[in-house]
Image: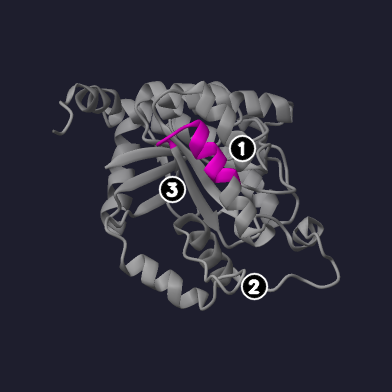
Amino acid sequence: MRLSVLDRSPVPEGSTGPDALRNTVDLARAADRLGYHRYWLAEHHGLSLAGPSPEVLIGPVAAATERMRVGSGGVMLPHYSPFKVAENFSLLAGLYPGRIDLGIGRASGTDPLTTYALQRDRRQVSPDDFPQQLAELLAHFDRSLPSDHPFARHGAEIAATYREQAAHPHVAVGLWAICAETDEEAERLASSIAMSMAMLRQNRPFPVPPPEKALRYLAQRPAPSGRRRIVGSPGTVRAGIEEVVAAYRADEAIVVTITHDHNARRRSYELIAEAFELARDLDDRLRAPAAG
């Protein structure tokens, strides 16, 4: 099983967007050193997150690291021209050969008003033509666009055929995890994102609050735990991740961790890496003889 990082570049209360971007690069360097397989960068708009453009942020993260794959988790394709997305990621792949991944999504990554603001043509709401967009994007990469038409057709059928014919299917599951030295400390840290998510559900995006503020808020308004939430000491978190991976029969677990304090976030990833002995596994892979 491979472990990866999903970074949304959260902006803690009392901090700034540039601070959050510097934290992203710092965390990426740490993840590269710790043995994580991939570093995913998310696209969100109009929220207390500093990374709305993974295609822009991938370059600095890849430049600051040496080994990890770096990708978009994901580009929200409904906002863009498939041809432009293909150009962007072909460029990144040329700069960092063998390390760039394009992950795409169908959602808007934001609220309806911001979605509308992202549209170039605002005469009407954009149609939901994701299957056609996906087919066109794939066709730009494998050069299978029909010669007599500028866009791919029968998108749903093409996408289904692509999935069926994949030589090496790869299943990845995303999950929330916060790891600390003790279960109690991890729960304290997790209160920050619990409050943030509670505010978001009220359509009131809010910077990630410090635990003390979050605990006071949650004492009056308990928040639901959410899906795939794994919080605790290294042993607790490892067991939780292994349980989810087994349930999904996944090849890769993508861990997203958001805390108010950046050092606590970085420490969480360090503890998870130690729990799974990622550094030892990385050393073993690096020492393994190349296939002849």
Q: Nearer the viewer, residue 219 or 106?
A: 106
The image quadrant that residue 37 belongs to is top left
The image quadrant that residue 61 belongs to is top right
At 53% across and 64% down in the image, what residue appears? Answer: 134
For the residues bearing labels 2 and 1, Cβ distance under 8 angstroms: no
Q: Which numbered circle lies on residue 109?
A: none
Q: Is residue 183 above or below residue 114?
A: above
Q: Secondary structure at mark 1?
A: helix
Q: Which numbered circle lies on residue 215?
A: 1
Q: Taking the image as drawn, is residue 222 in sight?
A: no
Q: Position of residue 101 (x, y in %)?
A: 46, 44
Q: Position of residue 264 (x, y in %)?
A: 51, 24
Quadrant where the C terminus is found in the figure: top left
Q: Position of residue 228 (x, y in %)?
A: 42, 52
Q: Nearer the viewer, mark 2 or mark 1?
A: 2
Q: Taking the image as drawn, is residue 250 in sight?
A: yes
Q: Which numbered circle lies on residue 175?
A: 3
Give the residues in magenta. 88-99
Mark 2 residue type: Asp
Give the CA separation, mark 3 to mark 2: 27 Å
Mark 3 residue type: Leu
On whether residue 89 falls in the magenta region, the answer is yes
Q: Residue furthest front?
A: 147
Q: Which numbered circle lies on residue 128?
A: 2
Which comes before the other along the chain, label 3 or label 2? 2
